[in-house]
Image (tube, rainbow, N blue to C red):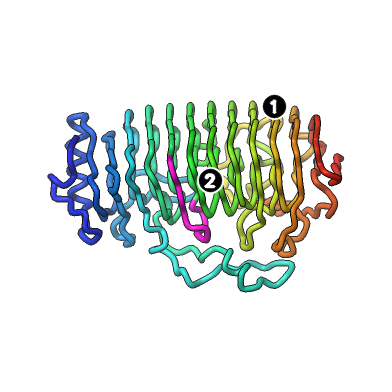
């Protein structure tokens, strides 16, 4: 291994080590060695892996700079976030491993006014406790933290990742990705600090992870390349908590297929499982979800979701996307061949399946146990589904436990609703 301290890195939490760490990475990229980060707090700006691997020893902390000037622009443009500025970057290099018992600290709170709150309009006034659940206003920040693009054979294992200012771990157009035994812990008031975002990738395993995030814990989409599917994904044995959506599949024009999710616990999340498709040019298909425990807690603020344990939407929500990004493909339907079984749901709002003109097909909900619990925050949005970023406003009957609309084709088997009603159009 190549020790970063031999290149002059100092783990005192004060010295800027970008050049020293980059020198170690460049040497490792030539020789095929792994870069070793010993115990200590190593402050750094952007470092480019270029195919080198990292081992973080117990007690080692790679700590991101809180100064935007330490994040130069990278040669990549993100459809939603713009020019890439990130701490850890790997573009087009294969066979990279990041492992160990150490920590990557992205210093997200340094980019926010932690005493300011972004309080949205609501059906009721926000009390002090509810205000403290809202997001901090977005300012200038690195829009990605760890960003891999067009890379194969990537493994991230064992490390702890904390305090992201925006998307924490992002993989774009990658293949054969393994994310194993990770602990991801981001601030619950910082917007967009998704735990793991998988975009237009093929062959991804996410296993044995603990993720607590202000935004989505795990997102599967094609947001970095609308024309390329995100496919062959396994998510298993994870414990998740999110102020938005614990697991979200699809978004706007994304094509996501062949997804297995099992043996996960979702706790205190604003929304549990979510499928998001536009009414055209999008598709989620071939999904199997089983053996889950989902608990929702409605979070005050402008988080997407409103306490729905399971929610599928296939409605227009691309009004903010520039015409240059609109794909040329048209899909026959938006959601199809989805089977969800053996799920215990405790939620503060109803479950929902809602499409447009029958564009949700071949959905099965089997052996679902649903229990409603009281909510202190449902007064803020009311008994409604949140279709954000769509402009749809839809009220749900207060006694409803599952609402199926838009001529969605859904088969129900052994639904234990505990006196809450099922409404199917």
Can the viewer see residue 236? yes
Which label number is shown at residue 337?
A: 1
What is the secondary structure assignment of the residue under circle 2?
loop
Tally of numbered discs:
2
The answer to whether 378 appears left or right of 111 in the picture is right
Q: Which residue is mark 2?
A: 217
Image quarter of residue 311:
top right
Question: Is 342 contained in the magenta span?
Answer: no
Where residue 404 appears, as percent x and y from the top left, is: 80, 41
Q: Residue at x 21, y 46 (%)?
A: 21
Find the magenta span and give its range.
182-193
Q: Camera-side residue: 222 or 169?
A: 169
What is the secondary structure assignment of the residue under circle 1?
strand
Q: Residue at x 31, y 58 (%)?
A: 65
Question: Is 185 contained in the magenta span?
Answer: yes
Magenta stretch secondary structure, dominant: loop
């Amino acid at each position: 291994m190549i020790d970063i301290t031999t290149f002059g890195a100092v783990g005192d939490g004060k010295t800027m080590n970008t050049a020293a760490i980059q020198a170690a990475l460049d040497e490792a990229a030539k020789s095929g060695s792994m870069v070793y980060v010993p115990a200590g707090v190593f402050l750094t700006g952007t470092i480019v892996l270029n195919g080198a691997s990292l081992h973080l020893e117990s007690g080692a902390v790679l700590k991101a700079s809180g100064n935007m000037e330490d994040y130069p622009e990278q040669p990549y443009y993100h459809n939603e976030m713009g020019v890439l500025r990130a701490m850890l970057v790997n573009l087009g290099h294969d066979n990279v491993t990041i492992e160990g018992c150490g920590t990557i600290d992205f210093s997200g709170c340094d980019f926010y006014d932690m005493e300011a709150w972004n309080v949205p309009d609501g059906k009721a006034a926000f009390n002090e406790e509810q205000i403290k659940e809202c997001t901090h206003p977005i300012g200038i920040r690195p829009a990605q933290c760890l960003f891999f693009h067009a890379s194969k054979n990537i493994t991230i294992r064992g490390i702890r990742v904390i305090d992201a200012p925006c998307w924490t771990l992002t993989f774009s157009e990658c293949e054969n990705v393994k994310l194993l035994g990770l602990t991801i812990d981001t601030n619950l008031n910082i917007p967009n600090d998704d735990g793991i975002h998988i975009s237009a990738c093929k062959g991804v395993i996410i296993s044995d992870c603990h993720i607590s995030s202000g935004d989505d814990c795990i997102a599967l989409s094609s947001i970095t390349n609308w024309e390329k599917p995100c496919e062959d994904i396994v998510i298993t044995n994870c414990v998740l908590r999110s102020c938005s959506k614990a697991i979200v599949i699809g978004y706007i024009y994304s094509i996501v297929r062949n997804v297995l999710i099992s043996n996960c616990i979702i706790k205190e999340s604003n929304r549990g499982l979510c499928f998001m498709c536009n009414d055209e040019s999008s598709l989620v298909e071939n999904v199997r979800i089983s053996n889950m425990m989902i608990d929702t807690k409605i979070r005050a603020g402008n988080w997407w979701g409103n306490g729905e344990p399971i929610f599928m939407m296939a409605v227009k929500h691309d009004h903010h996307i520039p015409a240059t990004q609109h794909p040329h493909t048209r899909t026959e339907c938006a959601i199809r061949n989805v089977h969800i079984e053996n799920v215990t749901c405790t939620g503060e709002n109803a479950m929902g399946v809602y499409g447009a003109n029958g564009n949700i097909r071949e959905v099965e909900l089997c052996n679902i146990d649903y229990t409603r619990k009281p909510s202190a925050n449902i007064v803020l949005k009311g008994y409604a589904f949140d279709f954000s970023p769509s402009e749809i406003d839809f009220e749900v009957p207060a006694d409803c436990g599952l609402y199926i609309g838009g001529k969605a084709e859904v088969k129900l088997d052994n639904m234990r609703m505990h006196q809450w009603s099922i409404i199917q159009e």
